[in-house]
Amino acid sequence: MLTRIEGGRIIDPANGRDEIGDIWMRDGRIVDAPPGASADATYDATGKIVMAGAIDIHSHIAGWNVNTARLLLPEFRLGSPARPGAKPLSSAGWPAFEIGCLYAAMGFTTVVEPAVSPHYALHAHLELADIPIIDKATLAVLGNDDFLLGLIHRKEDRAAVQDYVAWTLGATRSLGVKVINPGGAAAFKENVRTFSFDDVVPSCGVSSREIVKTLQHAVNALGVPHPLHVHCNNLGIAGSADTALTTIAAAEGLPLHLAHLQFYGYGKEGGRGFSSEAARLAEAVNAAKSVTIDVGQVMFGQTVTVSLDVLRQFNARNQARPRKWAILDGDGNGAGIVPYNYRSADFYNAVQWAVGMELFLLIDDPWRVFFTTDHPNGAPFTAYPEILALLMSRDLRAQWMAGLPAEAVAVTTLPSISREYTFTEIATMTRAAPARLLGLRDRGHLGAGAIADVAVYEDERDRARMFRAAALVFRRGELVVRDGKPTKQVFGCALAVEPERDRAIDRRLKAYYEERYGISDDIIKVPDHAIGRPAPFELISCAH
Amino acid sequence: MHHAWIDGAPAELAAAAATAARLLDASRQPVIAGLGADVAGARAATALAQRIGAAIDHMNADALLRDLDVMREAGVMLTTPSEASLRADTLLLAGPGLTEEWNELPQRLLCARTVEPGAGADRRKFWLCPRASWLDDDDRSGSIHNISVIGRETGDLPVLLAALRARVNGRPHGFARLSPSFPQALDGLADALKAARFGVAVWSAAELDALTVEMLCGLVADLNATTRFSGLPLPPGDNAIGVLQVCGWMTGFPPRTGLGRSYPDHDPWRYRAARLVDSGEADCVLWISAYRAKAPEWSGSRPTVALAPADTRFPKPPRVHIAVGAPGRDHDGVEHHPMMGTLAAVTAARRSGALSVADAIAAIAAHLADAPPSC
Ligand SMILES: [Zn+2]
């Protein structure tokens, strides 16, 4: 089956293209225009914008946390407008089924669930398996688990840590490794209430810095394409910019990804002791070439914060709106679900919104700043089209700022920023760069050999409208969305790495689980057959 | 050995599945009840409910929703059995039914070794209002050392917890009806709980009312003002938590949800299977019990399709009975793990040819009139 998308404006920064042309697809892949061949199906894209399918590197879409948020908040249907007349399960919004439909409608074809505690990996993968259309991946969260803390405490050699990381990635079928408030959840179990980068977990004397550096080296040495993904300490508090700057400095020239940097963009200036430090953070990121970040943009409205940063969520529980929450002291990591309402009239929330915008606009290199709301923590992913519109128009930003408390805008640099994102920068940030960051060589671009995940948009003046409902979306060459409406129920897979390891670690962990829990280490493993769908995983290769 | 029956008479699987599909197709308000199934069975049942517009309920939803109600009304601090086993230096057991709900509790929690210094075999243990008969059984209680018992009657528990919570917060308990020995014991207990490094409260919602669970969760939250404390609700049986998770991600809601409208409609009163059947609102029942030979408790004469072990005894033969095996015994599966508190894959202990719930539902669904829905 040969398919042609004809006459669109092709925006493909990975291949340096911004031109009118055709895209040809055969057997699920992009192919060069076959000389003299005629397509079995042709789609007219005249006047439209053609990009690769978008990739979201950080969105909480599955697992115990996400599901507990659903069960905690039956009264709202987060992330989904009501769709009268739709099929029963598809109108529910927050369920797995609708997540895939809503993402695909915006032209997204790959999404990473970035916070999977290893013992919950099977749950997360089962839930992901019920999300249609898009492909998925998970990041395994290490750094608060006794096994790793013990390795660091005993100063075991780097190979042992690497083997353990490789074992975890393989067992949990993950694409990369994340640390979340490293050491913070372990310390909280020992009644510690604040935890910074050079604080230590009392019982083992290991610092957050040691955990980050140990894992950063291990991930790098294993050749896992995605660098260590760091959720820093002190999320959300005034003065958290210092923590982020310290963490950026600790990258020391090796790859390191900082998640939702917006939540660390706060200083203590101004009458309320809360101000934007986005300019200082952006300067540090611009200078630290090995560092990548995603923003975690805040948008106004009701949402729910879901995080494995149990210490932060515990401290935030009294700000819950509505007034209820769930906190988990779990194995290795904790978790916390705290509903929250960002209000444009609120000074602090307005500063948070502006900090996110500043980071997007002040970090020069669209290959190193990633497009996220930390769904649903800053805003549901359905807010993406509005954010893209704001990035592409200073006039629109000025309109928004006019509606915010003046004293909030005054503690930011946002009014002075005139930059507007181009289509090429948008496509870099949402397609080409995420594919490179995750090691997905055949995604995020439209060159021959790429997976034929393609999004076609109307070139509308209203950019939010344009990005909310793609005119056409192809998944592996097959039409799955037309005019923002899913046309086909298909199920993708989860992408995972399986780095090499010395199998001695397997015996060691088997003994550890039996001694510690009295059960087999099989508990952590995610076998193909348990997922209940054909070919549930696709292996992504490591550097060596 | 037969695997399927129609009106009590042995039948071919295909004929039984076709008859089941006809009954479900003809139904105006079907209900999928029992729902004792592994994750694959729960996924299949929920997808079937969507397709035929059924309500879904679980046989242990009363207990399940009691814990859930406290969370969605107020807030909860939770931990896993494994964390409790490893870290707790203080255990507060509340009410009866704990060893019935989790028969490994004595060795996993009460006598376990731990990673934490000061915890483990010498952890401090308190039990508020255990079932008197349990304590009187020397064989069982004798295996547990150093357990302080306060109160015997389950009916005393709400008042005891309220008084304890007041004392933990430094307020007078204000309950004149407490028996004379309680106040001193409660003060000692309040001090012990506040002195915990990592304490865990354990209860079974199957035995408590919602207000008692809420009081206990409130006590745990209060203790975190100065120390660390967490809650361990014991999961109801028949994979209730596994089914809850599946229902959550597939519909957005726990069991007792109707899928007959254009949106999932969660109403714990309206979609309680026993009420739907007794009131006559449900005109067809799909009963699922894969873990044990359990028949529904209601007496109504609604046409019933049962997916249950071959040896299940029904008061009156269901219209269709398809025998299913048990997950983890007859076939592989995924279910809530009682020790780790998460979903885990289980391997068949003695693999048999018995159908899984998912297999049986697939067989029925193949005979349904309408096509499966798309996006
Ligand atoms: Zn996040």
Image (cartoon, rainbow, N blue to C red):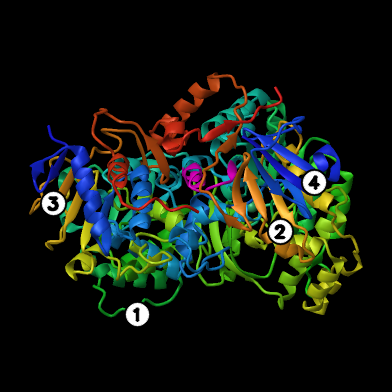
Tell me which numbered mark, 4 or 2, is placed earlier along the sequence: 4
In the rendered view, tell whether residue A180 sits above or below residue A421.
above
Where is B169 relative to A392, above or below? below
Tell me the number on the disc at residue A10.
Answer: 4
Tag nearer the camera, 4 or 1: 4
The residue tagged 2 is: A467
The alpha-carbon separation of the residues under discs 1 and 2 comes to 62 Å
Residue A126 within the magenta-colored segment of the rendering: yes
Q: CA distance from mark 1 to mark 3?
A: 55 Å
* Residue at left offset 56%, top offset 66%: A339
Q: Position of residue B184 (x, y in %)?
A: 32, 68
For image coordinates 72% across by 55% down, the residue present is: A457
The segment highlighted magenta reads A123-137
Any part of residue A39 in sight: yes
| Mark 2: few/some/many CA within 10 Å (<14, 14-19, 20+) | many
Judge left or right: residue A416 versus residue B49: right
Q: Disc 3 on helix, strand or loop?
A: loop
State if disc 2 and disc 4 touch (CB < 8 Å): no
Give the residue pinned by disc 1. Answer: B174
Instruction: Name the chain under label 1.
Output: B
Q: Quadrant of the C terminus of chain A?
A: top right
In the structure shown, which secondary structural element does the residue marked by tag 1 occupy? loop
Chain letter of mark 4 equals A
Residue tagged by mark 3?
Answer: B318
Q: Which mark is residue B236?
A: none
The residue under the point 58% across, 57% down is A485
Name the residue at 40% across, 70% down: B165
Label 2 amino acid?
A: Phe
The answer to whether residue A385 is left or right of residue A517 is right
